[in-house]
Image (cartoon, rainbow, N blue to C red):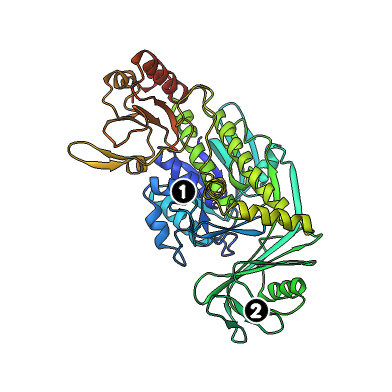
Amino acid sequence: MIDADVIIAGAGPTGLMLACELRLAGVQPLVLERQSQPLEIPKANGLGGQILELLRYRGLLDRFEAACTAPSPPAPRYPFGGIHVDLSPLKDPPLRGLMLPQPRLERLLDERAHELGAQVRRGHEIVGVSQNGTTVTAEVHGPDGPYQATARYLVGCDGGRSRIRDMAGIPFPGTTYPEVNRLGQVTFAESVTRLSNGDLDVPGLGKMRAGTFTRTDRGVFGFGWLTSEILMVSTTEDEERTVNDDVPMTLTELEDSICRVLGASFPLGEPRRLSRYQFQARQADQYRDGRILLAGDAAHLFPATGVGLSAGMLDAVNLAWKLAGDIQGWAPAALLDTYHHERNFAGARTMLHTQAQVALRRGQDQAAEALREVFLELLTDEQPLHRIAALIAGSDIRYPAPNPNAHALTGTFAPDLTLQTDQVTTSVAELMETARPILLDLADRPDLRETARDWNPCIDIHTIKTDRRPADAILIRPDAYVAWAADIDEPSATAAPALEEALSHWFGTPSVHAGD
């Protein structure tokens, strides 16, 4: 007996996002989480990057912004390799962030998953997995004892120490760095004086500049303002032991770390949030083994902050519609394999810049200081600043296209065009809220509409206008990435066959949709 279409191991942001996307695609997930209650430890203090655009395309961004603990500046400063990238010179920065601690993020995703009809069981631990040609079975220990759950697929979203990955025998090569990072959100102590420019005058340490890092031979210390009353303070120290970030950090632990790094005490007020983590650079050799797949930290760990959540949730969005296609019977044979190809590619791109950050931040000699100084100087120019921001955000990803001569939009996140008919004005973002594939006919091309007609009702076709159209027509996948586009005034003799090829590549043959 099949208990669900897809079993998801882990109710963190990746697992819950996957559950939401599967429900939008008409698939029934079962989320099994070993913890009986959601963790209140803020492993991440915010959410940023390309996932925010995807949330906007799902109509959820306003809801997430309303739950933030503090307003997010339109052009914030981001840490990058031990320095800060200041995006304020950019008119439209490609990188945004939300002050949304992970426990609050998980509650929002849990609420959304339940609204869509997903089943989430907490206190249910998967202790064994087996698969055959048609199903996968999980051995589960639940509050009422052991049981089995069977599904068409199982996705491990159970973190960097993934048991699903281990049980599937998928290698997870890489490096664990000796850095231990401690973060605290605290009120500032009465004995500390805040200066008019936001800097601090600290007894025993003197004036300390906000938004910069103090390097000593024992580690790195930094602080900045979250609000007018709340400080974010951080330390980085090399330690030989491996830390367990599931164990709550205390204020005393943070104070002791600051004292070791600075050689003097830095008075702290009341803690609001405390966390600790250690950097790793690891990527699974494969994201799929038969009917077992990996997503999020189970598939990759990056040695820098601010990118892991976005990458994992985007894994989920990429995977969900492909799983749905396989389960519903319309997917071409190789569709599910594109999950590994695309998201491993994106993970490698993220690994590239996060490992570059390791080189920037870990050097302590004069050559390293010179490298950081030159890097900062380059970021005073708009073009390299924009490129670095897009790199951190993940908005520069262009998935490899099946056709090497494809339109420049192919493989990129679909631009949010303003779209108009005689009666309505809408946008690409609004059309993507239902997570359905769409064909935008922007030049009234009956030849292209006729080509796509056989894929109805799988594909939503819109004949619509836009100012300064980037293409005659655009085929957009459920994850909001462009599957195909036609050049302006491209002849039907080339455009129509190319569209048919793209439709077949991503959505199977027309015959499988005939009974929809």
Query: Mark 2 or 1 closer to N-term?
Result: 1
- Classify residue 374 as left or right of residue 443: right
**Quadrant of residue 407 in the image?**
top left
Above-or-below relation of 235 to 371: below
Q: In the orientation shown, which residue stands out farthest toward the top?
A: 493
Label 1 sits on residue: 119
- Tell me: residue 147, above or below residue 76: above
Is residue 188 found left or right of 481 in the rendered image? right
Report, in whole angstroms, how far the alpha carbon at label 2 lies from the one at label 1: 53 Å
Mark 1: amino acid = Gln
| Amino acid marked by disc 2 | Lys
Residue 404 % position (x, y): 53, 22
State the residue position of label 2.
207
How busy is the neighbourhood of tag 2: few (under 14 within 10 Å), some, or many (20 plus)? some
Residue density around tag 1, few if under 14, some if 14–19, many if 20 or more, within 10 Å: some
Query: Looking at the image, which is closer to me, 136 or 92?
Result: 92
Kindly state the secondary structure of the residue where label 1 is placed: strand
Work out whether residue 404 can be spotted. Answer: yes
Name the residue: 24% across, 42% down. 425
| Residue 69: mark | none
Q: Residue furthest bottom?
A: 191
